[in-house]
Amino acid sequence: MKIAILGEGTRGDIWPLIALGSHMTRRGHEVAVVGSEEFRTMAGAAGSRFVALPASRSAYLASDEGQRSLRRGALTQMRGTQDFLRLHRKGIEDALIDATEGADALVAGHNVQDLAQSLAISRGIPQAVVHLFPLGPTGEFAPPLLTTRRLPSPALRLASHRLLIHLWWRGNLDAQRSFAKRLGLARPPRSSLHLCTDPRTLVLQAFSPSVLPRPRDWPDNWPVTGFWRLPSAVRGPLGEGLPADLAAWIDAGDPPVFLGLGSMPMLDPEGFLAMATEVTRSLGIRAIVNMPSADRGESAADQPEHLRTVGAVDHERLLRHCAAAVHHGGAGTLAASLRAGLPTMVCSVWADQPFWGKRIETLGAGAHVPFKRLDAQALEAGLRRLLSDPVRERAAALGEAIRSEGDGTERAAELLDEWLLTAEPFATPPPGACLP
């Protein structure tokens, strides 16, 4: 079958979709993947046809404008992202239309699942959805995108999910109306979060049940697969292995701690490095700091003996040599540090990151602090907590449980293959199934 896998976002949003595409290609399907240009090599290594978006969200976040929005808080970040997407709306639509030409089914990441729904309806093909964090209604916890507070009753938690569905739809309505009109639909369908409640829609939950047990009130079509992994055959061509000099430095002493923000831009990289250097020196521990500047070839001779910087690197390979991890809580980095059994401190920036930070703290396997509150005192306290015996023991046990689950990507591919056998094409919805 021809499968279109549609995504938009930073590396944490796109690489799981490419990983799924790699598994589906190995199962004999023909796959097209949508993402921004920096993922072309990754998609090619996965054996997928690649359709590039007109702009990169990672590049936007790293720009002066994107960094200003990060400084001003979550609401400003969301508005800035909406403005960015609005500016490139036609090019994004073009890429999605191109990728789904002749497709028998489509799979959508959460950032484009509404647009994908209109495409599935217009082409009369089935749609599956991938969620990297819980978006479906439940009475067990509030929506991660709204709050990390423990609301007092199941009814109130469900009401908060209904509020999220409404806000999600209203925030995307202009784009949905425009795209539906372009595709020849009389009106846009309801929010795709409503679509996910249809038992005929497969909604793959790409996280570990050991970290977040599957809510008891979720329907059967929302399987929690375990954390996804990028196949080694795809990782290899990216050139993100451990440099020989870094590997030698790791072997020459105690396991270091890892600090980095992944694809989230550091607002003050030099200040962050200076803080990390001083705190780890004070604690008498070694550290590896993930820094964009490290890709420009900074010499180890310019760094203190107890610390090294690194640019783009294979987290799976690096973190197994570390004692603890401090990062932003993005899906890929979180999975890698927890799978390695590392005590983890999440310095959350936005979106689902605070939810995962709180969850790790609740499990006793780490700590959480919003990045805007991260200073030398908070970093030192967090590292002391991570390196304490009780937290290390709980993190090691959690890592063992996650590893026992196997590769969630393989499980997701199996479920997707089974679903494709009986998946029903989308039809234009009746007026009662649409919003005005």
Image (tube, helix red, strand yellow):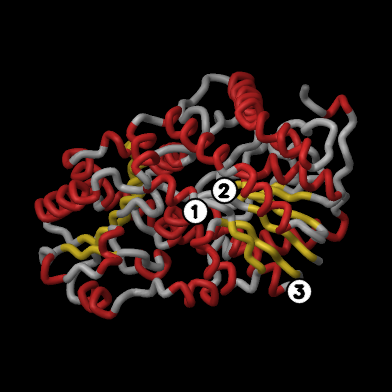
Quadrant of image for the C terminus = top right
Local packing at callout 3 (Cα closer than 10 Å; few below 14, some 14-19, many 20+) is few
* Local SS, label 2: loop
Q: Mark 3 = which residue?
A: 28
> Residue 435 in the image: x percent, y percent?
77, 25
> In the displayed structure, would residue 231 be above or below residue 131?
below
Residue at left offset 30%, top offset 76%: 243
Q: Is residue 283 visible?
A: yes
Identify residue type, mark 3: Gly
Residue 12: give its label: 1
Tell me whether the residue at label 2 lies in contact with that at label 1, contact meaning CB atoms closer than 8 angstroms: yes
Residue at 11 percent across and 71 percent down: it is: 301
Which x, y percent locates residue 372? 29, 35
Q: State the mark number for residue 132.
A: 2
Where on the picture, by quarter, is residue 379? top left
Q: CA distance from mark 2 to mark 1?
A: 9 Å
Q: Is residue 208 visible?
A: no
Residue at image coords 51%, 40%: 84
Identity, as a three-letter code, of the amino acid under mark 1: Gly
Q: Nearer the viewer, residue 342 or 371?
A: 371
Q: Is residue 13 above or below residue 296?
A: above
Instruction: Choose top left, top right, bottom left or bottom right for residue 22.
Output: bottom right
Q: Tell which tag, 2 or 1, sits nearer the viewer.
A: 1
Asked if disc 3 and disc 2 are in contact, CB closer than 8 Å, the reply is: no
Residue 163, percent across and down?
A: 62, 22
Residue 45 disc label: none
Looking at marks 2 and 1 on the same chain, the residue that comes earlier in the sequence is marked by: 1
